[in-house]
Image (cartoon, rainbow, N blue to C red):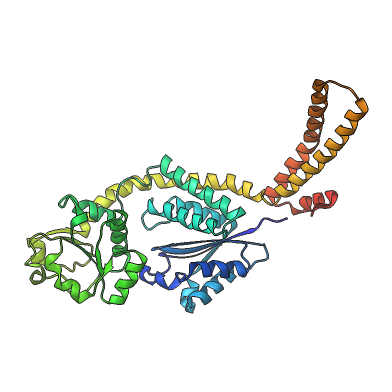
């Protein structure tokens, strides 16, 4: 009665460029769920964000975890390099990763707020469709609680530390209401992703452009924004209120001639080296990457002080929870043994009461309570040892109990 295997397969920003994550996203999520279930997983939860795609699965111990990677390879038509980007972790490591993920410890931005709600939505979808059941329901509900606890007990989510959120904060020191402004974002990489996520979290509309319209469309589909062609974006610079630049170029993308007719433009330049020429910097409000980084550094120091405490919370929660999880397989046996013993108890008490004849209700209750106490007293130590055997992986003792009580 070994515990089921818990598997996590993931592709994240750590091992693939963000703009290439679209290659590993499941185009038909329900079809992907069915494929995983039909090929050996008992339960499944798929998490997709702009920084990661992850599959959580539960299977029998003989299941080969690499099957998930190969199914992923087939469904998304990946190449071998992309297949090698799929990381696998098992059992306790897989659960710890989910706890850290929900707590914001595995994000690009430490303490990121959005990831907890993204984990929650992915789990709720899988649960509603019955892809997540006995094991993953317990695991994800615990992970969500751990994520909330970490944020409540630490300052890991306090203060803006992403380039996106800090850039917007600095812009708002000059422009009070961004909701009614024309905003353009140039770029499709990590910096652009952080800005887009920060804008989207505030329900602020923006246009997105990149060197190719296909990349802009892909970015918009994954993260948000209205995609426009690069040439069109350059032609409307005179009408833009806020310009975010998060792309590299071997020349100045933004020249004075392109923006000289715009008297209300604020620029956030996250490029290094800069893609904004000196004359623009002299005549317009330009927030530089150094200015953003300086403000982030101050807030980052505060968050980093909280990381070790947050890590300690996740590991303590994991140790307690994992023992509970290992007892899952043994609980049906324990329940059955108690029910069998109680059935015998009821049968013998009924016979005894009939033999005693006319006795008071109080005397009946005394006999009933005594019989319950005897059964519980006899079974307590064996069942307690059985649970400890499950936690310690003592399959020999569990097998002996199975044979002794003829449990199936």
Specify whether 163 is left or right of 280. Answer: right
Specify whether 9 is left or right of 304. Answer: right
* Rendered location of residue 144, percent (x, y): 48, 49
Vertical placement of residue 5 versus 364, above or below: below
In the image, farthest residue toward the front: 358
Vertical placement of residue 143 versus 254, above or below: above
Say which quarter of the image contains residue 270.
Answer: bottom left
* Rendered location of residue 196, percent (x, y): 29, 61
Q: Residue at x 91, y 25 (%)?
A: 357
| Image quarter (top left, top right, bottom left or bottom right) of the C terminus | bottom right
In the image, farthest residue toward the right: 355
Can residue 250 be spotted in the picture? no
Vertical placement of residue 31 versus 202, above or below: below
Looking at the picture, tell me which residue is in the foreground, 389 or 151: 151
Say which quarter of the image contains residue 269.
Answer: bottom left
Question: Could you tell me how many numbered marks the image carries?
Answer: 0
| Image quarter (top left, top right, bottom left or bottom right) of the N terminus | bottom right
* Rendered location of residue 279, percent (x, y): 8, 66
* Rendered location of residue 204, percent (x, y): 26, 57
Q: Residue at x 20, y 52 (%)?
A: 170
Looking at the picture, tell me which residue is in the foreground, 191 or 373: 373
Q: Residue at x 31, y 52 (%)?
A: 161
Specify whether 85 is left or right of 333. Answer: left
Specify whether 156 is left or right of 252. Answer: right
Can residue 107 be spotted in the picture? yes
């Amino acid at each position: 009665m070994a515990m089921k295997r818990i598997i996590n397969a993931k592709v994240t920003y750590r091992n693939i460029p963000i703009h290439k994550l679209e290659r590993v996203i499941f185009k038909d999520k329900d079809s992907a769920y069915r494929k995983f279930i039909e090929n050996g997983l008992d339960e499944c939860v798929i998490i997709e964000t702009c920084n990661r795609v992850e599959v959580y699965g539960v299977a029998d111990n003989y299941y080969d975890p690499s099957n998930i990677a190969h199914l992923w390879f087939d469904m998304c038509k990946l190449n071998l390099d992309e297949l090698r980007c799929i990381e696998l972790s098992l059992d306790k490591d897989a659960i710890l990763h989910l706890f850290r993920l929900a707590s914001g410890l595995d994000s690009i931005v430490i303490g990121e707020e959005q990831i907890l709600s993204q984990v929650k939505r992915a789990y709720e979808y899988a649960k509603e469709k019955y892809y997540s059941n006995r094991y993953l329901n317990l695991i994800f509900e615990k992970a969500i609680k751990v994520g909330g606890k970490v944020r409540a007990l630490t300052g890991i989510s306090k203060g803006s530390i992403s380039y996106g959120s800090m850039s917007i904060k600095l812009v708002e020191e000059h422009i009070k209401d961004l909701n009614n402004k024309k905003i353009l974002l140039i770029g499709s990489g990590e910096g652009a992703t952080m800005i887009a996520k920060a804008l989207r979290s505030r329900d602020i509309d923006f246009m997105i452009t990149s060197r190719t319209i296909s990349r802009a469309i892909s970015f918009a589909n994954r993260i948000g924004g209205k995609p426009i062609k690069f040439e069109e974006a350059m032609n409307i610079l005179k009408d833009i209120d806020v310009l975010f630049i998060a792309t590299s170029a071997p020349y100045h993308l933004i020249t004075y001639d392109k923006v000289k007719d715009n008297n209300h433009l604020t620029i956030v330049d996250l490029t290094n080296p800069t893609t904004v020429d000196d004359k623009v910097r002299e005549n317009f409000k330009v927030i530089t990457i150094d200015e953003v980084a300086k403000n982030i550094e101050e807030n980052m120091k505060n968050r980093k002080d909280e990381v070790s405490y947050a890590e300690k919370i996740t590991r303590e929660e994991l140790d307690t929870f994992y023992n509970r999880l290992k007892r899952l397989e043994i609980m049906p046996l324990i329940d059955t043994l108690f029910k069998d013993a109680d059935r015998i108890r009821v049968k013998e008490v009924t016979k005894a009461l009939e033999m005693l004849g006319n006795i008071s209700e109080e005397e009946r209750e005394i006999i009933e309570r005594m019989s319950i106490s005897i059964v519980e007293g006899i079974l307590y130590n064996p069942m307690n040892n059985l649970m400890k055997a499950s936690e310690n992986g003592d399959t020999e003792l569990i097998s002996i109990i199975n044979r002794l009580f003829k449990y199936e």
